[in-house]
Each structure stands twice: as C-alpha cells, then as structure tokens.
Image: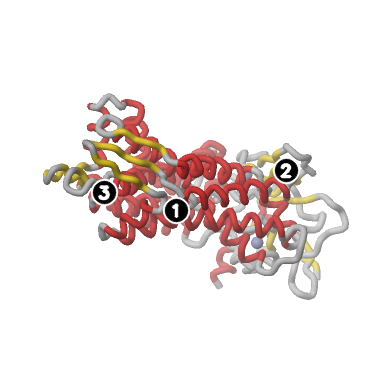
Amino acid sequence: MSTSGYQLNSHGELQTPEDNSELVLCRYCDLLQHLPELQPGEEAHCSQCGHQLDSRHPQPILRPILFASSALFMLVLANLFPFIQLFAAGSQHQMNFFDTSSVLFAVHHPALAILVWLLIQAIPAFCMMAVIYLKLGMIMSLPGRMWVARVLFMLKPWSMVDIFLIGLLVSFVKLVSSADISLGLSFWAFCLFCLLHLRTFQVIDRREMWARIGVNPKPLLTAKAGLPGVSQRLKVCHCCTALVPLQQMHCSRCGSQVHVRIPASIQKTLALLTTAAILYIPANLYPIMVTVSVGQRTESTIVTGIQLLWLDGAYPVAIIIAIASVVIPLFKIVILFWLCYLALQPQSDRQDISTWVFRWVDWIGRWSMVDVLVVAILAALVRFDLLMSVYPGPAAVIFATVVITTMLAALSFDPRLLWDQSNENEADMQQATAKEIL
Ligand SMILES: [Zn+2]
Ligand SMILES: [Zn+2]
C-alpha cells in the first residue's frame, strides 16, 4: 500500500527505502531534513532552529560502559564511608551520604526524604545501570531493552547529582564561619561519581542507541526534506526519534504514543504555570529552614536566607542562591507564559530565538532545586542536639513542588506550535489533530 511520502507494509509499518539516506524530523520545529552520515566527534544540528539532531562519539559501546560502571562503583563508595564531619563548640557530628534522606525521615518530612533519595541516589543509579544494560545489549541479546531505554530518557532530567554538588558547596559556605568541616572519603567518591555520571550522558548517542534496539523506518524518496513533517504526513516519536505516519497512533519501534502535537499543550502548560505561580507565594512567605540553637528557634525564608549570606559577606553564594531560587523560577514562569501567548498568535516571527529561549529555560529550570537540597544537607549535617540543629521548614516541600511543576510545564509545552503559522501548515496540522482526536 502506498500513500503520499511513505510506504506501509502488511503490518501497517513504514518500510525502509532502497537508498541509505536518512531523513529526520526536528522535535522542536518539525522540519524534515537529511541527516548526513556522521564521523566520531561530529554533531548534526537542525538547519532551522539549531537543535542537536544527532552526534557520534568514538568507541560508542566501551566508553559509556566504563564511565557508567565507574560511576556506580563511586556511588557505592559514597555510601560506605563517612561523608562529612562537622566540629562546633567542642562537639562533633558525622554525616553519611544516605543521611540526607534518612534524617529527613526521622524529623517527619517523608515526602522530602523520598524526593531527595530519588533525585540523588535512586534515579542516578538506575540511569547508570540502564546505560550499561543498553550498551551491553548492543553486543548481545538482552530482553526488555525497549522498556529500559524509554525509562532512561524519561528519567534523565530528574537525575540531580550535579545540583546536589553545588548544594554541598553552598552549605559549606553557610557553615564555614561557625564550624570546622572535615571532608570524608565518601565526599571525594561522590565528586567523582558526579563527574563520571555527567560524562556518561555526554558520550551516549541517542539515535545510534535506538537504531541498535530496533530498525528506524524511513519514508520513501517522495518525502521532501526542507518541509514541515505534518505536510509530508509524518510525525516524530519524542522517545526514540523514529518517523511515524500521521495516522499511526503508536511508534512502530518503541511503542510510545505519538501525537502530531502534544494534546492540549497550551492548556496543560498554562494550568501547571498557574499552579506554580500560586505555590510560589507561600514558598516565599513560609520558612524554608528552621534553626534551633541553645533552645532559640530561628526561622528563615528563601529571601532572609539570601540576606544572611549577603550580610556574612558570602556575596557569590548569595548571588547563586538568589538566581537559582528567585530569578530562575520567576523567569521560567514568565517566559513560558510568554511562549504560550506567542504560540496562540496567528502571526509570529523570530521563532528561532523563541525556540532557543524555550530550550534554555527548560535546561536551567532544574537548578532551582539547589535550595531544597541545601536544606536537606544542612538538616543532615547540623545535628548537635540541644546546642544547634537544623530542620526543614514547610516552604521546602512547597518550593520543591514549584520546581517540579515548572519542569512539568516545560515538558507539556510543544515548541512546534511556535513554527506552525510560519510553516503555513496550520490547516494540515488541524486536520491531523482532528483525526487523532477522532
Ligand atoms: Zn529544528
Ligand atoms: Zn519511538
């Protein structure tokens, strides 16, 4: 059976054409374009919006396995030995890496404890194991690779070991004037884990990995590069980047549900942004951290915490926390509202800039979690019974919810909506969306 731009076999799947040229759809601007064969060290970017379409690294199997297994080894070491020791007023307290979660449980903050455990232990460990499994699966037959790859790329933005490392440095600055800090073996193991974890994700070629899991169906030669995918009756799978015929609801390679545009994208984004904006008010009014020192209770909000750092002369850290906790969440909410407004306009221009801004706020939004992790670190570290102890305040959970909600808002926004008017494919798109709904 032949339709415009591609051919379906008896199972309703796209057939691979005779030639070896590869057509790809940009997930940010929906432009269909030829992907050149890349050599190790090369990257391919979208000619319209600049999004990285593909990359190639040398030794694509060995290096990710080595980095990921070394990272896992370092994570085990980080949990085995003392992490940090704190000396104050003749007393000492030793903190282990797992204490960042267990102490939060002990002081009756189970939601925060689970969140911190997921962000710095469970999700990073799963990601590293998944990378090893998938890379081994490229040289031997292993079951369930499709499921593992889908979960890996879904969880990747929620692995926050790099933010935890910055949180540790901020905590040290907060404590350095009142206590002596001694770094344990596990601290250095965690630093190495953080670097190896980041490096592992840098050397993974997503398209190459998916190509080894299942064949990427290609359109026939009649599909024209340089045109929007929707006008060529094609859409892109956000999970595995495969091309999917417009009328097909599920990706034939990874099984994910594929939509021509994210359904009710603007409505979902606006609802999540409104929730985040409302929660941002109590997140700033209530204390994020409570310090009990010699029976005296001191509560500090996000803003008063920044003021204290500034008064102590820790200007760079005060600026970092102010940017991460105040500027970024507000900026992200305002920018996403503005992008929703642009996407609803009948005519708009400079979509390359608005798409770049979207990618940037999407990337930077997770860094707002640094203040929540600082509270978790200080609560685990500063435990001198009656002398001095730190507890999370009610705003810690509320602020974590703000960060998570803004991250979900960015995931709900479909940047291709910004390009639809200029691509003059609105009619095609509306027709395709109507068919999907039916
Ligand atoms: Zn693009
Ligand atoms: Zn797919």
Give the camera-side residue of 416 and 283.
283
Q: The residue under label 2 is which amino acid type?
A: Arg
Label of residue 283 in the image: 3
Mark 1 closeness class: few <14, some 14–19, many ≥20 residues within 10 Å:
many
To which quarter of the image does residue 53 belong?
top right
Label of residue 56 in the image: 2
For the point 70% across and 40% down, the residue is 44
**Furthest residue toward left:** 295
Mark 3 closeness class: few <14, some 14–19, many ≥20 residues within 10 Å:
many
Label of residue 119 in the image: 1
To which quarter of the image does residue 39 belong?
top right
**Separation (CA) of disc 2 from disc 1:** 28 Å
Mark 2 closeness class: few <14, some 14–19, many ≥20 residues within 10 Å:
many
Horizontally, residue 326 falls left or right of residue 222, namely: left
> Which mark is first along the chain, 1 or 3?
1
| In front: label 2 or label 1 | 1
For the point 69% across and 69% down, the residue is 143
Give the camera-side residue of 268 and 308.
308
Q: Is mark 2 within 8 Å of ligand 1?
A: no
> Which mark is first along the chain, 3 or 2?
2
Residue 103 at x, y percent in the picture = 31, 55
User: Compared to 144, does 97 lie above or below?
Assistant: above
For the point 45% across and 48% down, the residue is 81
